[in-house]
Image (cartoon, grey):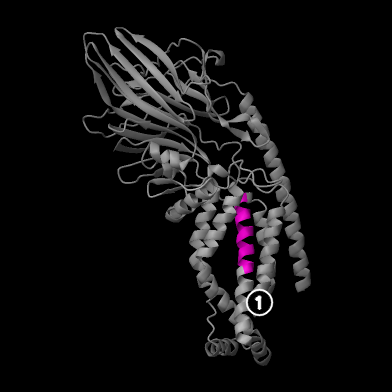
């Protein structure tokens, strides 16, 4: 009967493997097709927004109170009005090309309606197609907008301004470090410039409003910036193994927390609102994010909500700015769009680096990432300091191997205790089998005699488990480091492994991992219960099946860890047995 059961389990495992492989191929094909459709889709700028308002934000007297407006444009006062804005043809969008970006700006409002990251390919097999972060098409909506609201604001419930630019295409030329794109608007005696400043090798964009008030009265308006997104997952977003998905949603900083997630489900019924000096609002997804960072010296209001149109908004609004008659003023903000590089993000604004989400064990994960980064680049980030120590190995796969060796070395003394306990358990196995033969199925007597044997031989049955439990937080933290590190995306290792963030295309490393787990199991004493022994025999098969779809960088860690464990266990066990025999 047991043989039949084992055959059925094996057959079920094989069928499941075939189904999952077929599904993976189908998913990849659909993902690639969706990606190509997204790249070929014509951006639709200035789409007519549906009606719906943000609720009033309780503020201090110095802050604007949003009491009306549309989803896309908040207002400081007045009733809700509907906007029916015409769509702007794609050939009238302003195109900007830098070393990092391919951008399209809608002259109506000056919104970023398309943003592709030129240094990040969409897929490994399509290196010439950049990764699209922002876009507004018939299928997807994810844009960044900003404007001026209030008494003299340019953005009202009746519509948004149409800016003018000197040219329709801009490019950061070789030899130049910055590029300025000015959008101009004349408002009576007030001249406005919405200036985008791009810097070479930087994912941070400066967005300034320059106000030249030549009228006889003060100019008053508040600045708002927002991210508008639908609730769809990215078409190319895949699983990270065993159903664990990276976070997709908004985040912000509050007075209480440096980093607070606000996911789409949180705002279905009630908007999230807060006030903070400086701060930021961000849209976070796997490996990438976009974020508005307003002036750090102003008390800003934050509102994250789902509008009646079904779109999700993360908005920050500054206090009203006053520019005196015959005077000039400037409103400064920054917009980040790019990879989740935590060392760059921590320079931009407090808490923004926490968008690299390591979970509740972040205090362990961050030092592990620092070591991984150090092995690859030779630069160590610690306690706010940056130390260039050596040239680095220049390969993230070898960096994972070095980090695994270091972690294993740190736990060597604990492992000695664990393997010593296992060796003692193996040594008393003949006595355990003799007890089982003598007592048969008398479980109570067997339990009593077993505990007495443990006591007489000085064996702790949990001695091999407790040291392993102590190490589990480190293993979990390392899992999230390897999952969240954008540096592993499309990072090659050796040979056929071209992307450490993707699963092994030929399943070679998962099979090696399973084999190493099988060898490791043979070094451990077998469970006394036959059923437990059979279950343990199948664990390498089960884990191999799961690891088939893990990122190859994570599988590499487990392979190296298992091989080091086998070497350590063999060495320690032989040393203990030699000491016992002598």
**453 above or below 69?**
below
Q: Is residue 436 visible?
A: yes
Q: Which residue in the rendered view is the most extreme toward the bottom?
A: 438
Q: Quadrant of residue 273?
A: top left
Quadrant location of the N terminus in the rendered image: bottom right
Q: Is 554 inside the magenta-drawn segment?
A: yes
Q: Quadrant of residue 428?
A: bottom right
Q: Which residue is mark 1?
A: 526
The residue under the point 45% across, 11% down is: 165
Depth order, front residue of 188/349? 349
What's the magenta region?
553-567
Residue 486 placement, left or right of 276: right
Depth order, front residue of 27/1? 27
Residue 189 placement, left or right of 492: left
Depth order, front residue of 139/459? 459
Return the x and y of residue 121 as percentages of the image width and height: 61, 33
**72 above or below 238?**
above
Q: Which residue in the rendered view is the most extreme toward the front?
A: 390
Q: Is 314 inside the magenta-drawn segment?
A: no
Q: Quadrant of residue 188?
A: top left
Quadrant location of the C terminus in the rendered image: bottom right
Q: Secondary structure at mark 1?
A: loop
**458 above or below 409?**
below
Return the x and y of residue 360 as percentages of the image width and height: 44, 54
Residue 393 placement, left or right of 209: right
Return the x and y of residue 580 as percentages of the image width and height: 61, 86
The residue under the point 61% across, 78% down is: 575
């Amino acid at each position: 009967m047991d043989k039949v059961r084992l055959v059925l389990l094996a057959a079920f495992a094989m069928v499941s493997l075939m189904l999952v492989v077929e599904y993976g191929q189908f998913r990849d094909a659909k993902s690639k097709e969706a990606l190509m459709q997204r790249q070929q889709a014509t951006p639709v700028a200035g789409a007519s927004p549906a009606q719906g308002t943000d609720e009033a934000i309780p503020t201090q007297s110095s802050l604007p109170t949003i009491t009306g407006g549309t989803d896309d444009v908040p207002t400081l006062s007045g009733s809700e009005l509907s906007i029916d804005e015409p769509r702007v043809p794609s050939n009238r969008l302003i195109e900007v090309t830098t070393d990092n970006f391919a951008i399209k700006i809608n002259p109506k409002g000056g919104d970023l309606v398309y943003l592709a990251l030129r240094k990040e390919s969409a897929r490994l097999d399509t290196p010439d197609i950049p990764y699209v972060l922002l876009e507004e098409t018939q299928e997807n909506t994810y844009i960044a907008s900003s404007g001026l609201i209030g008494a003299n604001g340019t953005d009202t419930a009746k519509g948004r301004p149409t800016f003018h630019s000197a040219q329709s295409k801009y490019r950061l030329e070789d030899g130049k470090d910055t590029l300025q794109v000015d959008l101009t608007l004349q408002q009576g005696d007030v001249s406005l410039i919405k200036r985008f400043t791009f810097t070479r090798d930087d994912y941070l964009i400066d967005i300034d409003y320059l106000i030249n008030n030549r009228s006889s009265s003060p100019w008053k308006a508040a600045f708002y910036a927002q991210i508008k997104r639908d609730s769809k997952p990215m078409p190319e977003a895949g699983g990270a193994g065993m159903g664990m998905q990276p976070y997709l949603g908004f985040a912000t900083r509050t007075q209480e927390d440096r980093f607070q997630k606000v996911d789409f489900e949180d705002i279905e019924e009630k908007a999230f609102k807060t006030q903070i000096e400086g701060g930021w609002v961000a849209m976070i997804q796997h490996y990438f994010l976009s974020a508005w960072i307003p002036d750090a010296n102003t008390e800003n209001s934050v509102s994250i909500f789902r509008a009646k149109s079904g779109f999700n908004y993360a908005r920050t609004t500054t206090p009203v700015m006053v520019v005196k008659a015959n005077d000039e003023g400037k409103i400064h903000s920054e917009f980040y769009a790019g990879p989740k590089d935590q060392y760059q993000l921590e320079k931009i604004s407090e808490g923004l680096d926490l968008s690299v989400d390591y979970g509740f064990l972040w205090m362990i994960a961050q030092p592990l990432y620092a070591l991984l980064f150090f092995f690859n680049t030779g630069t160590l980030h610690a306690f706010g300091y940056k130390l260039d120590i050596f040239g680095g190995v220049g390969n993230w796969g070898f960096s994972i191997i070095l980090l695994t060796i270091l972690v294993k070395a740190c736990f060597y003394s604990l492992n000695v205790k664990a393997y010593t306990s296992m060796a003692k358990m193996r040594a008393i196995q003949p006595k355990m089998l003799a007890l089982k033969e003598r007592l048969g199925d008398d479980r109570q007597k067997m339990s009593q005699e077993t505990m007495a044997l443990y006591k007489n031989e000085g064996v702790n049955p949990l001695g091999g488990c407790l040291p392993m439990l102590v190490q589990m937080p480190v293993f979990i933290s390392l899992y999230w480091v390897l999952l969240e590190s954008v540096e592993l995306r499309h990072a090659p290792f050796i040979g056929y492994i071209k992307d450490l963030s993707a699963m092994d295309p030929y399943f070679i490393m998962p099979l090696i991992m399973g084999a190493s787990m099988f060898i490791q199991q043979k070094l451990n004493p077998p469970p006394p219960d036959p059923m437990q022994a059979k279950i343990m025999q199948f664990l390498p098969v089960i884990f191999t099946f799961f690891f088939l779809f893990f990122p190859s960088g994570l599988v590499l860690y487990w392979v190296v860890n298992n091989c080091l464990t086998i070497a350590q266990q063999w060495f320690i066990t032989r040393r203990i047995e030699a000491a016992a025999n002598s």
